[in-house]
Image (spheres, rainbow, N blue to C red):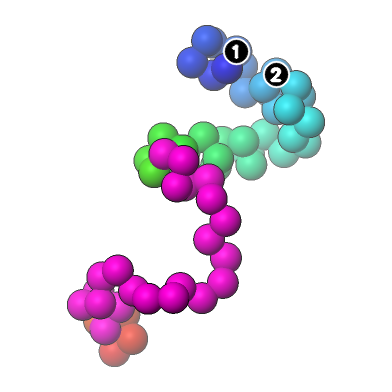
């Protein structure tokens, strides 16, 4: 819809999204990560993909 030039406010209205800011966040996540960015990521990870970065974060 956005690629067709429809304003964000109109898209939010049609999809029943009250917060246009939320739509902007979803659009950014999709642009940066594709479908994966829109998936649920809450909770603890099963394993860390970048162990070295995680070790540095914990220090």
- The image position of residue 5, as x and y in percent, is 53, 10
For the point 46% across and 47% down, which residue is it? 37
Which segment did they paint magenta? Answer: 34-55
Quadrant of residue 12 within the rendered picture:
top right
Picture residue at 72% right of the left edge, 38% below the top: 19
Left or right? Give the position of 57 relative to 11.
left
Say what secondary structure mark 1 lies in: loop
Of the pair 55 and 21, the residue shown nearer to us: 55
Q: How many marks?
A: 2
Q: Residues within 10 Å of mark 2 (few under 14, many from 20)?
A: some
Outermost residue, front side: 46
Quadrant occupied by the N terminus: top right
Mark 2 sits on what residue?
A: 10
Residue 59 x, y percent position in the rendering: 29, 89
Residue placed most toward the observer, 2 or 43: 43
Task: Write the residue at 56% across / 72% down.
Answer: 43
Q: Which residue is mark 1?
A: 6
Q: Mark 2: which secondary structure?
A: helix
> Is 13 situated above or below 29?
above
């Amino acid at each position: 819809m956005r690629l067709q030039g429809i304003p964000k406010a109109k898209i939010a209205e049609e999809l029943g999204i009250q917060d246009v800011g939320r739509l902007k966040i979803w659009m950014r996540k999709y642009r940066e990560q594709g479908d994966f960015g829109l998936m649920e990521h809450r909770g603890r990870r099963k394993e860390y993909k970048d162990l070295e970065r995680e070790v540095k974060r914990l220090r």
